[in-house]
Amino acid sequence: MRAAPPDGETFHLAGKFLEIDPPWRLVYTFTWEEPTPDDRETVVDLSPGEAENASRPVLSQGPFLTDERLELHRRGWTDSFEKLRIVTDADADADT
């Protein structure tokens, strides 16, 4: 897969789905196509969580070789979920 964040350079990812149980769980491997020495294959586990009548995604990913790689992914996921929140909030406002 090729991805291009709005404020960054294009990057390439690969992986395999390990578990698909819609809408409860998605588990897959995550591998950088052009890895650095600090990269390794990780496993992403994503499921909806419940928080006061609203779904709130629960995500885990790892293991990471270094704290720097962990922080890179943490920032990426945080940014992605924030963008998702903005879109879903806008959709909810449009429905009211």
Image: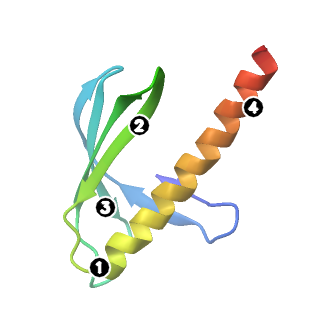
The Cα atoms of the two marked residues, 3 and 4, are separated by 32 Å
The Cα atoms of the two marked residues, 2 and 4, are separated by 18 Å
Residue depicted at 28% across the width and 50% down the height: 60
Residue 86: percent from left, percent from top: 68, 41
Instruction: Tell me the amino acid under the disc marked 2.
Output: Pro
User: Image quadrant of residue 42?
Assistant: bottom left
Residue on which the image places disc 1: 67
Residue on which the image places disc 3: 31
Secondary structure under tag 3 reads strand
Instruction: Tell me the amino acid under the disc marked 3.
Output: Thr
Instruction: Tell me the amino acid under the disc marked 4.
Output: Ala
User: Image quadrant of residue 94?
Assistant: top right
Give the label on residue 90, or none.
4
Secondary structure under tag 1 reads helix
Residue on which the image places disc 2: 57
Looking at marks 2 and 1 on the same chain, the residue that comes earlier in the sequence is marked by 2
Looking at marks 3 and 1 on the same chain, the residue that comes earlier in the sequence is marked by 3
Which of label 3 and label 1 is nearer to you?
1
The Cα atoms of the two marked residues, 2 and 1, are separated by 23 Å
